[in-house]
Amino acid sequence: MKRGQKLGEGKTETKIQIGSEKNLRKINFKKILPFIVIVLIAIIVIIAYPIFFGSKSRGQQEVHQSQIGGKSQPVRTRVDVTEIVPQHITSLLNSMKAYELHNPPLSKDTPKIKTIVGERIFSSEVKKKVITTTEGDTEKPDIIISSDKETFLDVINSGNAKAAIEQGVNSGIIQIEMTASKTRLFFKGYLSLYKEITGKELKDLL
């Protein structure tokens, strides 16, 4: 009987140990369950964010799609200029390669350009391939470029200032007046500048 009792007691102890291990596993699982849920939620958010918010971010970067010739093409929007400042005139002159103008040989006579925008006047000077523009009149400009404000704004906002200026000059909307002598213009490099703007030879007009 003692042997039977010992065997029974051993089986009972084994069952108790197995039951305890199962209970511990359940308790441990309950403890880590919230952590597992949090990790899963974080993974889902990381994966879903680019899908739902990526297109909006690209839209905020001002990249849009337009239909051109039946194909979708990327188009970047821009903020149009509404007021003209001296920097805009400098930028336009740079697009015409006015920075290549220079003093005549052995002379301190710098190239000077007057730009009339409606009722406003801007004066530009070229020194060592650098164009400096200020608002106000200048004495003895070599050439005068003039048009209304709306035309200049259209040129600035066109995205291709050189082509817009050439079109404006050839159509007569933008006027270029040569106020310096032919010799003075030649030695300062204006013949190349005029051809750059209009595609025509300046010497044919002088």
Image: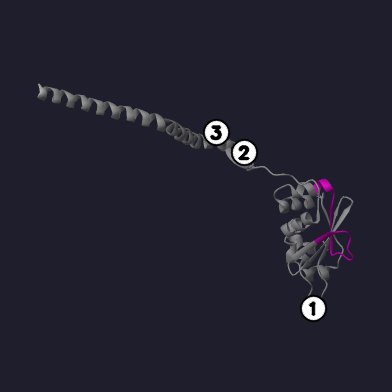
List the residue tagged with mark 3. Answer: 52
Q: Which residue is mark 1?
A: 106
Which is more toward the observer, 175 or 203? 175
Q: In the rendering, at what x and y percent does residue 141 appear?
A: 86, 64
Let me know if residue 127 appears in the view.
Answer: yes
Q: Residue reaching furthest front?
A: 2
The residue carrying mark 2 is: 59
Q: Quadrant of the C terminus?
A: bottom right
Q: Amino acid at mark 3?
A: Phe
Judge whether residue 101 is colored magenta.
no
- Magenta-colored stretch includes residue 137: yes
Label whose residue precedes the other's in the sequence (2 or 3): 3
Q: Residue, x 78% and y 66% (percent of image)? A: 126
Q: Secondary structure at mark 2?
A: helix
Q: Which residues are magenta?
A: 133-151
Q: Is the Cβ of the residue at disc 2 closer than 8 Å to that at disc 1?
A: no
